[in-house]
Amino acid sequence: MSGNERRWSVGELARATGLTVRTLHHYDEIGLVEPTERTASGHRRYTDADVRRLYRVRALRSLGLGLDAIAESLAAPDTRDALRQVLASQLDHLDREARRMRDLRAQVRSLLERMTSTEGIEVMSLLETMQMIEDYYTPEQLDYLAKRREELGEDAIKEVERAWPEVIAAMTAHQQADTPVDDPQVQAVTRRWIELGDAFTGGDPGIRDAVTKMLTDQGGKLGQQGGCMSPELFEYVSRAIAAVSGGRSPQ
Amino acid sequence: MSGNERRWSVGELARATGLTVRTLHHYDEIGLVEPTERTASGHRRYTDADVRRLYRVRALRSLGLGLDAIAESLAAPDTRDALRQVLASQLDHLDREARRMRDLRAQVRSLLERMTSTEGIEVMSLLETMQMIEDYYTPEQLDYLAKRREELGEDAIKEVERAWPEVIAAMTAHQQADTPVDDPQVQAVTRRWIELGDAFTGGDPGIRDAVTKMLTDQGGKLGQQGGCMSPELFEYVSRAIAAVSGGRSPQ
DNA sequence: CTAGGACCTCACGTGACGGGAGGTGCAAGC
DNA sequence: GCTTGCACCTCCCGTCACGTGAGGTCCTAG
């Protein structure tokens, strides 16, 4: 009854399973699904048992498991238990991956939006700033900032981003003209600067410090190029803010 | 003023950027970020311009872009436009990946649940059935079935899965005892069989046909092993269903 | 003069195959 | 007997973004 059942060649099996011949060769190579027999000339002859094993492999493969994990769980003495373990671990692997994709997607989308909304600003400085933010903020601070952005809403953010270059330009002009920091015009610009900074940070002092550290570090590192504040401007703003509010660190 | 700025060694740059020395070597190898200078002894000396390029690369890398895509978009005549394109394509790549992860996760989770709820059934036949379903249903049918499952709710599904083995066992007993298909007991079991089948398929004739095709094909392919219906049982059920309802195809 | 650290190039390994080169087995048609 | 053609064989390089050595050089401090 089970003496000589049907035998399958690689090609037949490939067509039947939708896998490629190369894949079957690979499974044979690594010992995952080996044909029980070979013909005298070396052709692979799969038995029904081999085929069933292949079906199991394919099923587990379609769940995203690695070949080594599949091999292990099929070789385990208690398949059910081994399978449960590997599936559980796969489940949170997939969870992590899904989260990663979601987060990446959100980042790409926000960058794309910013690219269209802030036509004037150089793309490159956008990129650099983005990266610095990743470097200098703790994950909690990043979370906090993300929440802030949501609270503010799209329109408010765009308004802030539109206003920043103006304020920076005005401040730079005063700095280069060496206007005294207690000049009423400078004080007005400074108050606007603080306002915009607070809109961004939500007034969190930790984040304020991180920004300060970032700007000074990067100022020293990369000079005034690439969207960074120049040390001179930084110093000028520091003094201006001190003049307005009495010793707070600058934005 | 810009005659001789600071130069960076690989190690310094690695520490500053959080990348590894090997990564910088790699970027150099493929021409993505090459140090403008080398010392006489061959040591890499990165200029500030190189460093800025590296920062851009790192920023784009953190969005999940490939190195070739990064190279292209940085080399393009209109960086802004090239970047927008590559980011847009990356966006739907990430979308697809995220969906894939979600779907995989759902499959793994449902299999895990089924493994705990159907202690009695062999795991392997679960796997094989799962895979056959993928093979024999069209994507639309799979969608339809998924919706059906949601409509039914967890409890109803578990109830059906619990009941199936009983019905199959009863039917097999009648088939092996060769009970005539118009026997009232057989008719009762058959009605239950139809009921369960309809709960699963929602009575959709296309799906009913797919199941029939699947069972006959697989019966021929793999014999009665691995959770498949035997041809004899299949034929018996066909007759029983015909006797009860008048010529409908079996479940 | 030597120890140590930073740097160099070369080259293999990762996962799951794709794809091609170059050769063999086997049946049908001439 | 010969060719054509197909299915099959093994061997091996390529993928992607690096990790991880191995083995040698450069440079500074003690």
Image (cartoon, coloured by chain):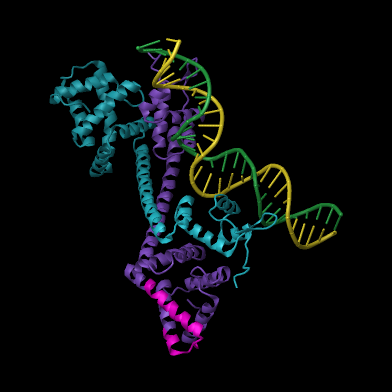
Chain colours: A cyan, B purple, C yellow, D green
Q: Position of residue B70 (x, y in %)?
A: 46, 35
Percent position (x, y) of residue A207? 23, 33
Q: Image quadrant of residue A6?
A: bottom right
x, y percentage for residue B212? Answer: 51, 73
Quadrant position of the C terminus of chain A in the picture: top left
Q: Is residue B117 left or right of residue B40?
A: left
Quarter of the image for residue A144 reads top left
Which span of residues is magenta-colored? B160-188
The answer to whether residue B217 is above or below residue D9 is: below
Could you say which quadrant of the image residue B63 lies in?
top left
Magenta span: chief secondary structure? helix
Q: Is residue A233 among what the camera can see?
A: yes
Place of residue A123 in the rendered image (x, y in percent of width and height, measured from the top left): 38, 32
Question: Would you say residue B184 sits in the magenta stretch?
Answer: yes
Reply above or below: B183 against B216.
below
* Left or right placement of residue D15 versus residue A41 in this view: left
Q: Does residue A224 appear in this view?
A: no
Q: Is residue B233 magenta?
A: no
How many numbered markers are drawn? 0
Observer-nearest of C29 and B227 = B227
Look at 56% across and 68% down and name the residue there: B222
Quadrant in the picture for the N terminus of chain A: bottom right
Pick the front one: A119 or A249: A249
Looking at the image, is C7 positioned above or below residue B157? above
